[in-house]
Image (cartoon, grey):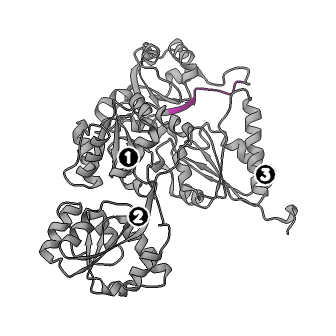
Amino acid sequence: MASTAHRKLGKVALVGAGPGDPKLLTLRGLTLLENADTVVYDYLANPALLRLARIEAEKIYVGKKRGSSNAEHQSKINALLIASAKAGKNVVRLKGGDPFIFGRGSEEIEALVAEAIPFEVVPGVTSAIAVPAYAGIPLTHRKLASAVTFITGHEDPTKAESHLNWEKLAAGADTLVFLMAMGNLSAIIQRLIFHGKSPETPVALIEWGTYPYQKTVTGTLQNIEAIAREKKIKPPVVMVIGEVVSLRDQLNWFETRPLFGKRIVVTRAAAQAQDFIEQLAEQGAEPLSFPTLEIVPPPNWEALDTAIEHIESYDTLIFTSVNGVSYLRQRLRDLKKDLRLLKGIYICAIGPGTAKAIEDWDLRVDLIPDEFKAEGLLEKLTEHGIKGKRFLIPRALEAREVLPDELRRMGGEVDVVPAYQAVRPVYSDEDIERFLNRGAIDMLTFASASTLRHFVEIIGKERFEHHLKESDIAAIGPITAQAAEEQGLMVALTPKDYTFSSLTEAIVDYYQ
C-alpha cells in the first residue's frame, strides 16, 4: 500500500452552484459534479444538485452553524478541502451563486495554494444578476440605467468601519444590487437617503430568488421596511434599488406562470417521476417528490425465464407499463438473448408511455388502445381475435386481474408472469413529519391505485386529516379515482387522457 506521502493528490474544483434553480448550473459544473468523489456544499447551494453526483460520492454539508465565528468556520472548511485532496479525492466545493461574488471563494483558493493543492474555479450564475431577472427586473436599460453596482449588505464584522463609500453609492450607479441585505436593511436605507438618494427611489426585495417559492415585494426607500415587515420577508434576499424596478410590472415572467406558488406532491416511484416533475416545474409549480412505490425485481425469475424460453409459442405480447418493458428487456440481456426471439409476435401497449418504451427498444407496437386501460385493450383485441391464441403478460407481481380473466373468458390462453414488483417504501416518523411540516400542500397527485393506497397508509389517517384535508387530489384515471373514493377522498380532477402530459394540462386548467 502506498504511503500518504506518495499518494497522488486529488483536485478541488470551486463550482458556482448558481442562484437556486438547478437548471442554471453550468455544463462544466455538471461534469465535475458527476465525477466527484466528495461534494462539499453550503446553505445556499440547492440540495437538488446533490442528486447529480454519484450515489457513492461523499456529501458534506458545511452551512454555518450558530455559535461559531466566521473565521473559525472558514478555517474548518479550508482544512476539510485540503484533507480530502491529500487523500487523493476529487472534490467539488459547491457554493451558491458565483464563488467569487461575496462568496469567500478566494480565501478557500488561497488556502489550497498554500498547500500546493491543484484547483479549478468554475464561475456560477450569480444571484446578483439571475434573481432580479427572475423577478422581471433588468439591471440596465437604455433609457433608465447605464451602470450597475453590486454591494454586500453584510460586510466583514471584524472590520473597524465600513469600507463602502455611501456618498458615491447614493449618487453614482443608476442601479444598486445588495446581496445579504436584510440584516442591515434599515442602516442601508438610512445611509443612502442621508447621502442624497431620493426617498422615492423604487426598491425591490426578492426572497429565495429563482426557487418555485420566490417572493418579491416592491416599494420605495421610504416605505420598503414597512412592506418587508408586513409581508414577512426573510433572508436570503436580493435587494435592487433604482428606476429599473418600475419595469417589473411589464417584464415579470417567472411569478406569472400558471402554477407558480402551487406545492404539488408527486407520489410516483422516484425512478419514473422526473418527467412529470419537470412538466409541473415548467408551469411554475414546486413539485414535492414523495414516492409511495419502489420498483424492484420479483421474488424470483423462474416464471419469466420459463416464458422467455418458450416465447416463440406466444401469439401476442402485452405490456401494461413501462416497467414491464424495461424488466423484460433487462432479463433478455441477462440471459444473453436478443430481439430476434420476438420476431412475429403481435405487440400491444397500454398507453403512449409504454409504447414509447417499446419503440425505444427498436420494436414496433402493433396495438395501442384508445382508452389507456385494460378494458380499452380488450375492446381492440376482440377485433383482432382472441379465441385460441396464446397471450404473454409480463407485469407487476400484484395487479388487476381484469385483462387476463377476460382474455381467458373469451377463449384465450394467458400466461401472467411477474417481471417486477412494486413495494411500499419505508418512511420513518421523522421523515413524514419533516415532509408534512414544510408548508401547506395544494395538491396530491396519484398515478395508480397502489400509489394512493400506499400514501394513505404511510401518512396515516390522523395525519392526513390534520395536514392534508384541504389539499386537492388529482388522479390519472378512473381506476385511481375509484381507489380514492374507497378511501373516502374526493377527487378534484382526472385528465381526459390517462397520461402525465394530460394530467399536467388538467392541473393547469384547474387552477386557472
Dot 3 and dot 1 residues touching (CB under 8 Å): no
Q: Please name the residue shown 21% across and 54% down the image.
A: 497
Say which element carries label 1.
helix
Measured as percent of width and height from the top left, residue 512 is found at 22, 36
**What are the residue bounds of the magenta stretch?**
149-157
Q: Quadrant of residue 202?
A: top left
Q: Please name the residue shown 33% across and 78% down the image.
A: 362
Q: Please name the residue shown 75% across and 47% down the image.
A: 80
Q: Nearer the viewer, mark 2 or mark 3?
A: 2
Disc 2 from disc 3: Cα separation: 49 Å
Q: Which residue is mark 2?
A: 397
Say which element carries label 3.
helix
Crowd rating for badge 3 (residues with CA inside 10 Å; few <14, some 14–19, many 20+)? some
Disc 1 from disc 2: Cα separation: 17 Å
Which numbered dot is residue 83?
3
Q: Which of 493/141 is in front?
A: 493
Disc 3 from disc 1: Cα separation: 48 Å
Say which element carries label 2.
loop
Q: Which of 321/247 is in front?
A: 321
The quarter of the rendered structure image containing the N terminus is bottom right
